[in-house]
Amino acid sequence: MKKHVVLALILMTIVSSCAKNEKTVQTKNVVDYVDPFIGTGGHGHTYPGATSPFGRVQPSPDNGTTGWDWCSGYHISDSIISGFAQLHLSGTGIGDLADVLLMPTNEEKDLALFGKSRDSLPYTSRFSHNEEEATPGYYKVVLKDPNIDVELTANDYVAYHKYTYNAADKPSFVIDLGYAVNWDKPLESQLKLESGQRIVGHRFSTGWAKNQKVFFVIETSSPIIGQRLMGDAPIGDAATEVNGVKAGGQFFFNENTDSVEVKIAVSSVSIENAKENLRLQGSPSFGEVREKTRADWSGLLSNISVETPIDSLKTIFYTALYHAQVAPTMFNDLNGEFRMQNDSIAKTDFKMYSSLSLWDIYRAETPLLSIMDPNRLDDMVKSMLVYYDESGVLPIWVLSGNETGTMPGYHSVSIIAEAIMKGHTAFDVQKAFTAMKETMMGDERGLKAYKKYGYIPFEVMDQSVSISLEYAYNDWCVAQVAKKLGNEEDYAYFDKRSKAYQNFFDVKSGFLRGKSKDGKHFHEPFDPKSSNHIEDTDYTEGNAWQHSWYVLHDVDGLIELHGSKEPFTLMVEQLFTEDSDLSGHNVSPDISGLIGQYAHGNEPSHHIAYMLNKAGAPWRTQFWARKILDTQYSTQPDGLSGNEDCGQMSAWYIMSAMGIYPMNPASGEYEIGSPIFEKTTLKLPNGKTFVISAPNTSKENIYVQSVTLNGEPLDKTYIMHGDIIAGGTLEFEMGPTPNKKWGVQNDTK
């Protein structure tokens, strides 16, 4: 009898434990699926530090290493931390920022070594990744050498540091305004101890962005009882202010201080504005801000709910959703003011954005925002128009309010067209169209030759094919807006220009190749696998294999050049199955994530798999989309196959994992791929929901058998933006073998 009682108790305990575990799984917050360390390895170039959604500040650890894989300041392969700066880039291919570096310590340091390379810095520390933690809005690490715990969090405008001195001797922290890596170079800096708990100053620098001005205020929870400052030359110990190219200092607390909270607010305008940002958003404690930012992220990430028994897929998905909402970053102060690159001070009543990686994010991030956060997309468009007002052309790649001119094309044109074609009217649509048209009618960046020849000849400039193809898409975008606005003359003109890609087609090889001024000769010698980075090349960060498909707006026209759908499809298949060898004397490092010659690690390849829908082979789109999802993303630090690029690499995953992708973003069409989740629920800003259901999807069941939209059979390979915004259900029947009849008869409009 006793044995039965014991067994019953054991069973009750097991059932209770399972119920608790099940409850834990069910109630797990979406934030807990996010791993900010994904992308910090390989060539992802992300940072693990704290930020709010699209936040102005991004406090994060900096290794102090110069190199391509340290564009964000941090790489998982490193074991040294040089400090914690307040501004960082997410996943770019060029390194900059890392402004206003702070580093806690517990002993007096040699100020003469400030502003040096890492090997000479006196305040660096070893750390272990086993003693590192990161979640959205929070980061923690143990600095081994001084035995100090560092915690970081942030709200929209204020960075928060917390230092716990486990072996206090001279608890203190250093500020090194001369600290710089990669492209960044300090020009002028200032530090001033304004009161016992407040430090102010500025740091002016040049780099990728030529005119960077950061004003800051630092406030400590404990009184500063002493300081030592250093400029370009030593100054007296009693000094409270220092100026120089590389100003720095060490600030000391009472020797019995165990823990200190430090708040840092920045501004591009003035110290007064930084103080106002601190006053308005710097009152809560570290813990309160951490919880508030966590709640902000939870609310944002919960707008998309995915159902799958595979937790690793949730980790990849929600980390991608997190990364897709880190940039662009807000740039104006809380009073609306911000600095333009010409040093004028502008003011807006909307959120002004910088870190606009337009060549990247127009492909999938802005389409994602058009569904989930259309008001933010409106503010991005308004921001672009402010930059247009200052310079006379729409922006290309904006950092710290500066035009960097990075990457081909004018994809502000693409994003504005997308917003207008999707019915956005929160900005001046007519002004936006004028800005688009004037930008594309300019003479800079190869446009003069483009207008003269109908393409850019290879004799005129490097990257001639890629740049011309980008302009052709921009032209198509202008044409669509012109048509929508009833401007038939502009429509006809820009629609004709959008056919520029036809000039490059080589019938013999099937590639788009560099063309001479006389239009009679292709660029020789030719090797479709050859890549030279930026110079001595017809292609941007790639080769002919990757760039011969950049005709987002006229896939039917490109298919026609190939002769028919069959040879087009065969060549796309060859792209994925060709060997991955590359040639050239300076192969672009951006060519990564190779499947054959398809390079998922860089954006020019991102749409290619979905072109097979238009070629009458949607089952091949499904196969390759699933192949990319399965092989190019993981839960590891190197889980991104290339630069995150301010959200695009992640946005591709988000859209494709749901089973839809905006191959031609401005068209409002979302191509159907292969959903990996049994159910995806999108909470739309208008209060409606859009559900994507694929109950029998699996690693084996990757092929679409049939699709219904709101209960009606869908036989075409795309849905429209309006279908999503209206709310409803897109339901997939999936299977292990292709249904070669679905979507084939009606695969074009």
Image (cartoon, grey):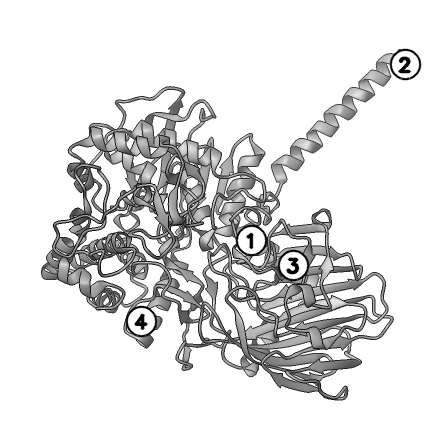
What percent of the width, then of the height, locates residue 508?
A: 18, 36
For residue 6, above or below residue 202: above
Q: How many discs appear?
A: 4
Farthest residue, direction top: 1
Which of marks 2 and 3 precedes in the sequence?
Answer: 2
Which residue is under mark 1? 297
Q: Amino acid at mark 3?
A: Arg
For the residues marked 1 and 4, what is the alpha-carbon distance in whole angstroms? 32 Å
The label on residue 2 is 2
- Mark positioned earlier in the residue sequence (1 or 4): 1
Label 2 to label 4, Cα distance in Å? 83 Å
Between the C-alphas of marks 1 and 2, the distance is 52 Å
Q: Which is more N-terminal, label 4 or label 3?
A: 3
Check residue 185 in the rendering and tell me which mark sits there, or answer none. Answer: none
- Say if 570 sits above or below 332 in the image: above
Q: Residues within 10 Å of mark 2 (few under 14, many from 20)?
A: few
Image location (x, y in percent) of residue 17: 74, 29
**Location of the N terminus (image quadrant):** top right
Q: Secondary structure at mark 1?
A: helix
Kindly identify the amino acid type of the residue bearing the numbered disc 4: Tyr
**Camera-nearest label, 2 or 4:** 4
Instruction: Between residue 409 and residue 463, name the one nearer to us.
Output: 463
Mark number for residue 388? 4
> Which residue occupies 26% across, 48% down?
667
**Residue type indicated by callout 1:** Trp
Quadrant location of the C terminus?
A: top left
**Which residue lies under the disc numbered 3?**
290
